[in-house]
Image: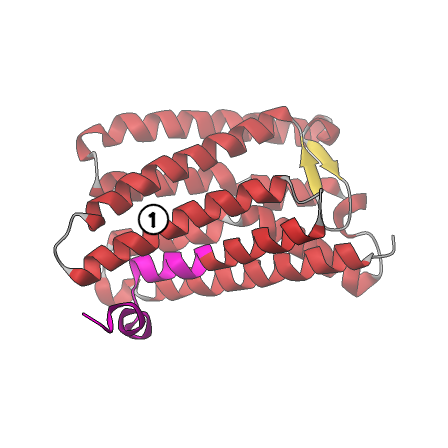
Amino acid sequence: MVLTPDHILNGVFSLIFAVISVIIGFIILSKYPKSKNRTVLLVGLVWLGIVSSWYASSSSFLVALITGGDGYMSAPPYYFIIGAVPLPITAFIWMDAFTDLLYRDKKKTILLIVGISGVLFEIALFTLLFTDYNLVGTVTSPVDAEYELFVTIYQIFLVILVLVSGILFARESLKSDTPEIKLKGKLLLAAFLSFVIGSLLEILSGISIAILIIARLILISSSIEFYGGFILPQWMEKLFLRNK
């Protein structure tokens, strides 16, 4: 299949977002050996996992670009394994980190609910991958796929989970009187909102390539905001707190 200009644009932006997310995820992880902060370790893993859908898109694009073929269109299970399998694991890790900081008394219950739903999702996913992967979804181009209802429902569940827990988490930081911690809260709030808005715009990206570009730019900004919210590098602190 020949890559169209829209496919190339889609693939390039997907690749940029994936690369930036990987870099930021590993930067956060690199802080763990020195800090020994378990939350830093978990959060780094979360950001590496939460963008798995874009790993599938960007790697399929690279395969198509290098081979001159159709990416994962001829091997859909690869797309679904890369894009969907990490989601329940990521959800569990995120809630583990979240309940370390908030609602510790409800940690076991929350992790049990998220864990059971994740296991059921993985069982259904792998069962269909080995029996009839068309029931998981369809790879519609070298860059895109359309998932069936049960995957879409889980993706929506994950988006809602991230949004609600992210807002609650950021709200705690916003209550602080310390400017740096309050700034972290603002950046985290922006990151979670940007990620959700960007993800929702992706659903509408078939309407216009302009919507796709806007969606990916918002997603890229969410990575940078997430990085600032957890690490707050000096350059970002100086940029936002220069008048303090």
Q: Nearer the viewer, residue 120 or 163?
A: 163
Secondary element type, mark 1:
helix
Label 1 belongs to which residue? 189
Q: How is the image coloured?
A: secondary structure
In-image side of 157 versus 227 (left or right): right
In-image side of 75 versus 220 (left or right): right
Which percent across, then down, holds residue 90? 44, 42
Q: Which residue lies furthest to the left in this view?
A: 177
Instruction: Say if the magenta span includes residue 230.
Output: yes
Which percent across, then down, holds residue 243? 22, 72
Instruction: Tell me the quarter of the image containing the C terminus.
Output: bottom left
Q: Nearer the viewer, residue 235 or 105?
A: 235
Which percent across, then down, holds residue 231? 30, 63
Q: Which residue is drawn at 64% across and 51% down?
A: 212
Vertical arrangement, residue 176 with respect to residue 237, above or below: above
Query: Magenta segment, which residues?
Result: 222-244
Q: What residue type is labelled 1?
A: Leu
Instruction: Say if the magenta span includes residue 189.
Output: no
